[in-house]
Image (cartoon, rainbow, N blue to C red):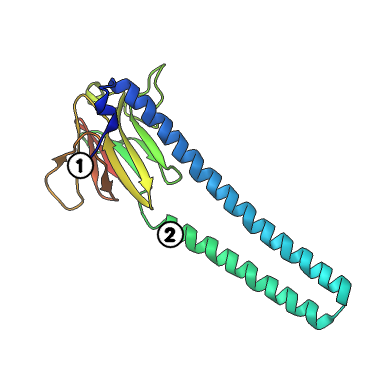
Amino acid sequence: MFKPFNLFNIPRHIKKIALRSKINKNTNGVEKGHIILQLINVLIVLALIAAIVYLNYVYKNRVLLISSISALGIIILLIIGGIYRRNKLNNYNTVSKLILKDDDDRILDEWDISNNVSCLIGKKTKSNEVNINLSKAVYASLVSREHAVINKANNKWYFEDIGSSNGSGIKRKGESNKFKVEEGKPYEISSGDILYIANTKLYVK
């Protein structure tokens, strides 16, 4: 994969600043897209209502009024159906949580990511904010402050190591062995997988 940053040998922390900016941009873009789509739907319904009122005022024809109201009802049902199908598609990927457990399989922390587009995994400090804070992990000392990211694209989740000191890995659902991931390469993940952040296990649900 072509990585233009490597041509200029930019330090890792500069790469991570750029990555954080990209995550925020993607998240804001998705939210704005949903708002715009909702506004368009509202404007369509308002325009149709205005047209019905106008036609009724001009022609005062009961048959025309009933036909117009029926057509409006059908259009509203189509809009609602489209919203339902879109939400169903968005929820098709069942990944909704990341869970941190200790060696005795007790839950130390968990994060609901169902409404997120991107999450930064690492350790929270005074100067470093992350979405998935692994400071409570048994092997937290091996976790980089900004270790990895998970991104949602086309209703699928992807995991990517962003230049951590001790690396990352994935164990697929139903498999006994984990594999090490390459830095900067996204890997699709699904419910039942286990993410290895150095020696720390994150369960994907």
Left/right of residue 47 with respect to residue 84 in the rendered view: right
The x and y percentages for residue 78 are: 58, 69
Please tell me which residue is depicted at 54% across the width and 60% down the height of the picture.
83
Give the residue at the far left of this rendering.
177
Residue 49 drawn at (x, y percent): 75, 65
Q: Of tags 1 and 2, which is closer to the observer?
A: 2
Helix, strand or loop at mark 2? helix
120 to the left or right of 73: left
Q: How many marks?
A: 2
Q: Residue furthest top?
A: 126
State whether residue 80 appears in this view. yes
Q: Nearer the viewer, residue 176 or 156?
A: 156
Regarding mark 1 in the picture, which secondary structure is present there?
A: strand
Q: Quadrant of residue 129?
A: top left
- Which residue is more in the foreground, 59 or 137? 59
Q: Which residue is mark 1?
A: 170
Q: Position of residue 197 (x, y in %)?
A: 24, 32
* Left or right: 83 as drawn, with respect to 73: left
- Label 2, on which residue? 89
Q: Is residue 95 above or below residue 150?
A: below
* Amino acid type indicated by mark 1: Ile
Looking at the image, which residue sits at the far bottom? 63
Residues packed near mark 1 inside 10 Å, few (<14), some (14 to 19) or many (20 plus): many
Query: Is residue 106 visible to us here?
Result: no
Q: In the figure, 134 relative to 83: above or below? A: above
Q: Residue at x 74, y 79 (%)?
A: 67
**8 or 193: nearer the eye?**
8
Q: Are marks 1 and 2 in contact (CB under 8 Å)?
A: no
Q: CA distance from mark 1 to mark 2?
A: 26 Å
The residue at the point 25 percent across, 22 percent down is 9
User: Identity of the amino acid at label 2?
Assistant: Leu
Query: Percent x, y for residue 131?
Result: 40, 32
